[in-house]
């Protein structure tokens, strides 16, 4: 068998031993790499070396005038090979400070994630020359070991496994295979555009490097492999440190965290963020996290990092989203219409008001008396710190003090929905009801609960 077919067979055989007779999905552009991958896979099927279901996925980005032709080409090739084709159309919009190439890649991966509900092996045609280019792009960005490890042979893609079975195969071998089997493929005209960094490296940088050092592709791939091994060791160390420092799914014990060396602190912060699918922070951002943890104990510093925010509260370091300011938001509720729902801002869910309580109510629901005739019912996320008498207290106290008593973090206090009848505070949704508004047992009432 051809070396590419043998390599593919050995890779799949090992995966099948682990994952069983799992479905195969080919990420197929119609270019030479994915065409060779598809052909080799069909050869294995025809030789009865595999009997897995095969689905080909072609993602139409709509970025080229030839996009429809490429889709038609994909359909014709799949018809010829008697394999099933699924076309995914995506809408890629240019964004500031994001490369179009990266946006298109992310759109492809998102499309592949949603292709199947059950776990599949998603195969791509990436080869060793692609690995070299990825390594040099990471080097240009000043990446650490994680970036310089470039592409791994196997990685998680949603519920699927993304497999790059040709990562040890060169572009030259790919081209030779295509010529040997007289394959057809498409050429993306954007591959000639050297304003894209990857194309610049492919067309101008790598030829110079190979002219000087013919084996440079092998040595770059070897360096990427060494970086991957180093990163795996760092991840093992971070996992050990995390087991000591973790307080909850989204928080760390600060005292234990700051007892680590600077290198281990930085490594754990990056690992913790990776566990939450965050973009990797810069060195300066990680340094800021460490410095802000030295702030006075009466302060609650917050540091924005890669679209997320680290916040300190009561000896813990929390990783949270970068919440929107919703202090000016207000919603009106008309309870005369019976059961109603109010959609809250910033993905906080829907606040439901039920006047008929013949339904399942969980422990987070609150039952209050109905407003008086003519009273306005409103919900907002701000208050003027009035005195209140919560259902769990014997004496009145200011709202701020009550929320502090409940150990609610400062940023979460700004995301509590407050219910008012006219201008009088009725309840802090999910936390307390003011005693004057607790419904007596035999009186008409309304039950409210937050549906996230």
Image: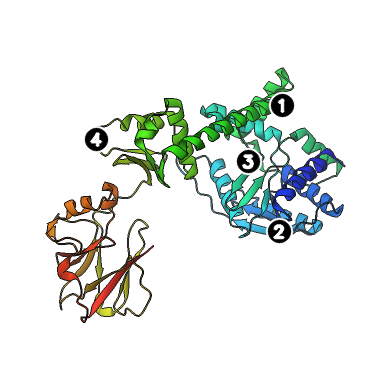
Element at badge 2?
strand
Q: Earlier in the sequence, mark 4 or mark 3?
A: 3
Q: Mark 3 points at which residue?
A: 190
Element type at mark 3: helix
Left or right, 173 with reference to 254 = right
Distance CA(mark 3)–CA(mark 1): 27 Å
Q: Say whether marks 3 and 1 touch (CB < 8 Å).
A: no
Label disc, if present, on residue 297 of the rendered structure: 4
Dot 4: element: loop
Marks 1,2: beta carbons within 8 A: no
Q: Residues within 10 Å of mark 1 (few under 14, many from 20)?
A: some
Q: Residue at x 70, y 27 (%)?
A: 217
Viewer can see residue 121: yes
Question: Label 1: which residue?
Answer: 218
Residues under labels 4 and 3: Cα distance? 55 Å
The residue where tag 2 is placed is: 85
Tell me which label, 4 or 1, sits earlier in the chain: 1
């Amino acid at each position: 068998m051809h070396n590419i077919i043998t390599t593919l067979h050995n890779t799949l055989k090992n995966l099948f031993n682990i994952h069983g007779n799992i479905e195969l999905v080919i990420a197929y552009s119609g270019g030479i790499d994915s065409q060779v991958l598809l052909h080799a896979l069909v050869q294995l099927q025809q030789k009865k070396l595999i009997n897995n279901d095969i689905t080909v996925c072609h993602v139409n980005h709509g970025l080229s005038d030839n996009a429809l032709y490429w889709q038609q080409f994909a359909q014709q090739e799949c018809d010829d090979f008697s394999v099933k084709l699924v076309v995914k159309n995506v809408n890629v919009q240019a964004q500031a400070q994001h490369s179009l190439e990266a946006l298109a890649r992310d759109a492809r991966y998102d499309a592949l994630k949603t292709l199947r509900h059950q776990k599949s092996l998603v195969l791509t045609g990436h080869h060793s020359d692609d690995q070299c280019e990825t390594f040099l792009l990471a080097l240009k960005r000043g990446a650490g070991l994680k970036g310089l490890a470039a592409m791994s042979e196997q990685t998680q893609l949603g519920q699927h496994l993304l497999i790059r079975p040709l990562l040890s195969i060169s572009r030259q071998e790919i081209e030779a295979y295509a010529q040997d089997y007289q394959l057809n493929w498409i050429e993306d005209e954007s591959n000639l555009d050297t304003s894209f960094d990857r194309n610049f490296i492919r067309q101008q940088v790598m030829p110079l490097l190979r002219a000087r050092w013919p084996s440079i592709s092998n040595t770059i791939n070897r360096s990427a492999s060494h970086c991957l091994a180093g990163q795996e060791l760092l991840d093992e160390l971070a996992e050990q440190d995390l087991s000591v420092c973790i307080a909850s799914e989204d928080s760390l014990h600060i005292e234990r965290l700051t007892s680590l060396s600077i290198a281990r602190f930085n490594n754990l912060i990056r690992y913790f963020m990776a566990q939450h699918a965050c973009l990797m922070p810069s060195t300066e951002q990680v340094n800021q996290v460490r410095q802000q943890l030295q702030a006075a104990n009466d302060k609650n510093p917050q540091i924005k990092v890669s679209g997320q925010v680290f916040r300190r509260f009561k000896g813990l370091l929390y990783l949270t989203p970068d919440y929107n300011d919703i202090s000016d938001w207000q919603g009106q509720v008309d309870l005369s219409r019976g059961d109603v729902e109010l959609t809250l801002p910033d993905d906080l869910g829907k606040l439901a008001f039920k006047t008929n309580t013949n339904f399942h109510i969980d422990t987070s629901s609150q039952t209050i008396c109905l407003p008086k005739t003519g009273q306005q019912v409103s919900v907002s996320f701000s208050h003027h710190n009035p005195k209140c008498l919560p259902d769990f207290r014997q004496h009145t106290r200011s709202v701020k003090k009550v929320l502090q008593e409940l150990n609610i973090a400062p940023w979460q206090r700004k995301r509590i929905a407050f219910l008012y009848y006219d201008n009088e505070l009725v309840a802090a949704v999910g936390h307390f009801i003011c005693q004057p508004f607790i419904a007596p047992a035999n009186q008409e009432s309304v039950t409210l609960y937050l549906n996230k």
